[in-house]
Amino acid sequence: MSVNDPAAAMVDELTPEQLLFAIAERRDRAAFTILFRHFAPRLKAYLMRLGAEAGAAEELAQEAMIMVWRRAETFDPAQASVGTWIFRIARNKRIDALRRERRPEFDPEDPCLQPDPAPAADGQVERGQSDERVRAALKTLPAEQAEVVRMAYFEDKAHGTIAEETELPLGTVKSRLRLAMGRLRKALREENPTL
């Protein structure tokens, strides 16, 4: 666009609405340049008043103007003026940037996301021995006590559910569990007095 270009001079005299329609209808670069020169500095100042740093405000203003170029045909003068529409785009860009800042990046090295280390071999052996002692102690329980222990601790059922399924009073279920746990503790202490 040269300084003496009559088409450029004509574009300079258009209103922002006419400029936006020229962009929407013909992808008029001269119209966009004028619109950009008018609104970009104002958007930057507005975004800085909203709390954005100068560099970020300039980047957001440019992103907003790119959106104006891409979405010019969606502008509806019945809904808002050109200025209101462009400033709303800039404000939405700022909100999106704030959301990205507040949502932390995924860090694959975060200790919370790392798998637990494999248990040491001696720990696995000890756990296996402990499991075997508990299984042996469970075999010493009367059948009705073993059943409520199995339902409560291995099937993770609530005492009320056990009472319903076994058709026993809730107090009986609790008594059997209490007796069973006492017998298990005694049997495990006899086998290993340090418990």
Image: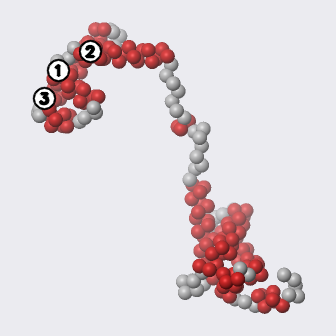
Contact (Cβ within 8 Å) of mark 3 with mark 1? no
Are there few (<14), some (14-19), or many (20+) residues within 10 Å of tag 3? few
Question: Which of the two discs, 1 and 2, sits closer to the camera?
Answer: 1
Label located before the other in sequence (1 or 2): 2
The three-letter code of the residue at mark 1 reads Ala
* Residue lying at 73% horizontally and 79% vertically, measured from the top left: 32
The CA span between labels 1 and 2 is 13 Å
- Of 24 and 175, nearer the camera is 24
x%, y% of residue 34? Answer: 76, 81
The three-letter code of the residue at mark 2 reads Ala
x%, y% of residue 116? Answer: 51, 30
Q: Which numbered circle lies on residue 143? A: 1
User: Residue 89 sits in which quadrant?
Assistant: bottom right
Q: Which residue is the site of mark 3? A: 172
Element at badge 2? Answer: helix
Q: Is residue 21 left or right of residue 134?
A: right
Label located before the other in sequence (3 or 1): 1
Please tell me whether residue 182 is drawn above or below residue 68 in the rendered image.
above
Question: Which of the two discs, 3 and 1, sits closer to the camera?
Answer: 1
Element at badge 3? Answer: helix
* Residue lying at 75% horizontally and 90% vertically, measured from the top left: 13
